[in-house]
Structures are given as C-alpha cells and as structure tokens.
Amino acid sequence: MRAEDVKKLVNDQLQDLKVGGNFEDALRKEMDQANSTPFTVEIEQAAPPKRFSTPSFTHFKGDSDPESHLKHFKSVMILHKADDALMCKVFVMTLRGAAQDWFHTLPSGLINSFKELAYVFAKEYTFYRTIKKNPDHLFNLRKKSDKSLRDYIKRFKAEKANIVGCDDRIASSAFKKGLPAEHNLYRELTIAPSQILAEVFATAERYVLWDDDRIAAKKSTKQEDQPTKRAGQKNDGFGNRNKDKRRSHPKEDATAGESHTKFSIPIHQILSQVKDKPWQAIQRIEDRDTTQEPPQKVIRINTILADSEESGLTNKEKKRKIKQAIVVSQVLTDLPQAKDDPVIGF
C-alpha cells in the first residue's frame, strides 16, 4: 500500500471518530469510557484471594438466555460466592463481543454488589430469556402410531426435564393420557394407577421389551412377504401383457365389415317352411384376381331364397339348395358400404 493510501485511510478513520466536529474531545471521551468501570471503589480495589485461578466458563455474547448464563456462572463459582468483589470481577471476564461493549456503557460507580450486577445484566438481555414450560405442556405429548413405546418414553422424559417443579401426579396422568386407549400399558395404568412417576416408568419399561419384540416380528414378516408379492406382480405383469397382446391382435381370418343375419327361430323351422317353395337362381360373382389389386372390403351375406314357382327347379335341386350355405361376396369398390344384415329375397 502506498503512503498516500495509508494517510487517506487514517484520515477517514479519524473523521469517523469526530463528534460535533471536535475530534480531540471525542477521542478523549472514548478513552475515558474504556478505562472507566461501573464498579464502586470498594469492589474495584478489592484484591483476589491467594492461589485463586480463574476457572473455565461458557462465554456470553449477548444472544442467549441471561438466566442460563447466570446459573452456569454461579455453579462454577460456588466456592467463592461469599466474595462479592471477586464474583463481580470474574463475571465481567465471561462477557464477549456486544455484551462486553454493553458493560462499558454502564455509568461509573453503579455496581456495588454482585446482586446488583446480576439484576442489571438480566434486565438488559431479558428479551433473550427462554420461555419456561409449565406442567400442562406434558398433556400435549402423544404416542405416535408409527413409533415405538420406547420413543414415546424418551420424548416424555426429555420434555419433563425442561419443566422445573413438575408434580409427579400431574406427570403420571399426562403420561397415561398420551397412550392409545387400546394399548395394554394404558389398561394397566388405569387399573392400578401410581402416584409416583418412577413407578410408572418402571412399569412402562417392562412393556418396552414386549413392544420391541412385536415391532421386530412385524418387520420380519413384512420382509418375508415382499419377495412373494414381487414374484406375484412379475407373473401378473407377463399375464397381463399376453392378454393385452391377444386383445390388440384380432383373429386374422376375421373380415372387416363382416355381417351375419340373425334369426329369432331355429333354422330347422325355417327350412321346413320353405322346403316346398321354388328358388330363384343366384348369380355368383366371380372371384377377382387379388394378387394384382389392393385388398378390398368384403361383406358376407347369408341369404335364404324365397318362393318362386317360375324357378323351374326340381325337388331334388331344391333340397340340395336348402342344404347349401349360400354366400354372396359383394366386392366394394367406389360404392357406399352396404347396410348391416342385408337379405336378398326373390
């Protein structure tokens, strides 16, 4: 960095420290504040005990629960709680960052005891206090249907530990309330209620062993069933595919547009009625050479010949005609499609 840049940087920093245009007064005020202490003269001049070594603490940076930090500090300094001056000085050593800056903004001579320091400290950071749960919170806990009894006991104990001064009768009632009514443990706690939470947990631990075995057996059965289900699904898949193939490919000999006349009476009755009646000759349409022409739509028509005395057929020929299945192949070219079930009568 060049000398000009260093000079400019220093001037900028000095300009930021100016208050009301008087740099020297602002700098002197800031230095006095850093060297001052909010403790009274008695606390400031008190000497620490001989052979005292500062213990390790969790530092407070101004973004956590102040009561929790105070409890932690008092627990570590329990052997020196009678030394008020020492408690004040060591407590300041646990502050870091914004909390340390806050301490130096306190007026000089404000703190004359550790009790006063703890009060000012808790008041400053009261909005970081953790909201304490009351015993009624335990009634919100429920055993989840997809979780084990062991999991429910673990969660209940964790929540109970965060509630100070919770009565055993309330905790026992809340624990039973969280169980499903059809659970065996719920039935036993109802038949033989206990006022001591330790006894409730002891009874619950016996059911934990049974519940663990039940869950393990259920998982084992589920794993055994999975290969069978997969094999069945695999076979069903092949079967369904074959069925779909058969459905998607109609019979090759089926002719598009094929139509058959349906009768409401048996065929032998029809034959008996028309056997003595003459027949009109049916002109047969010659087959075309389909090797040179594109496939054409064909309609099959089953036709019964009606009476005609002018047919000139003998009885023998009539019987032969009756026994034959006469099929007329109608070749459609540019003509419109014939209607369904056409019957040619003479």
Image: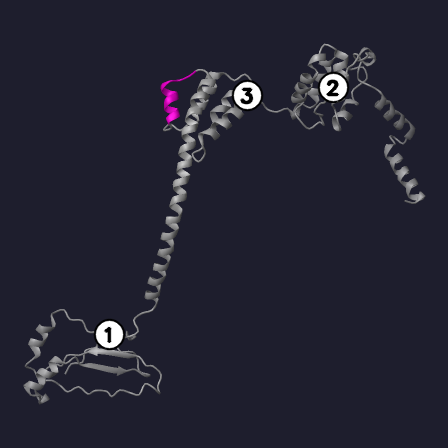
Which circle's residue, 2 or 3, is located before the other in the chain? 2
Describe residue 100's horizontal placement relative to residue 318 as left or right.
right
Tell me where residue 255 appears, x and y as whole percent. Answer: 28, 75
Which circle's residue, 1 or 3, is located before the other in the chain? 3
Q: Residues within 10 Å of mark 2 (few under 14, many from 20)?
A: some
On the image, numbered disc 2 is attached to which residue? 91
Q: Amino acid at mark 3?
A: Ile
On the image, numbered disc 3 is attached to which residue? 163
Q: Amino acid at mark 1?
A: Ser
Question: Which residue: 74% across, 24% down?
Answer: 95
Q: Marks 2 and 3, Cα distance to the nearest angstrom?
A: 27 Å
Question: Which residue: 61% across, 24% down?
Answer: 130
Residue 185, magenta (yes or no): yes
**Dot 2: element:** helix
Q: Identify the image quadrant of the N terminus.
A: top right
**Dot 1: element:** loop
Tell me where residue 180 appears, x and y as whole percent. Answer: 40, 29
Q: Nearer the viewer, residue 32 or 216?
A: 216
Q: Residues within 10 Å of mark 1 (few under 14, many from 20)?
A: some
Residue 78 sits above or below residue 176 on the image: above
Describe residue 325's horizontal placement relative to residue 255 as left or right.
left
Question: Which residue: 42% across, 16% down?
Answer: 194
Write down the region rendered in magenta.
Answer: 184-194
Between label 2 and label 1, give the one nearer the viewer.
2
On the image, numbered disc 1 is attached to which residue? 259
Tell me where residue 266 appears, x and y as whole percent. Answer: 11, 70
Q: How is the image coloured?
A: one colour
Q: Marks 2 and 1, Cα distance to the nearest angstrom?
A: 105 Å
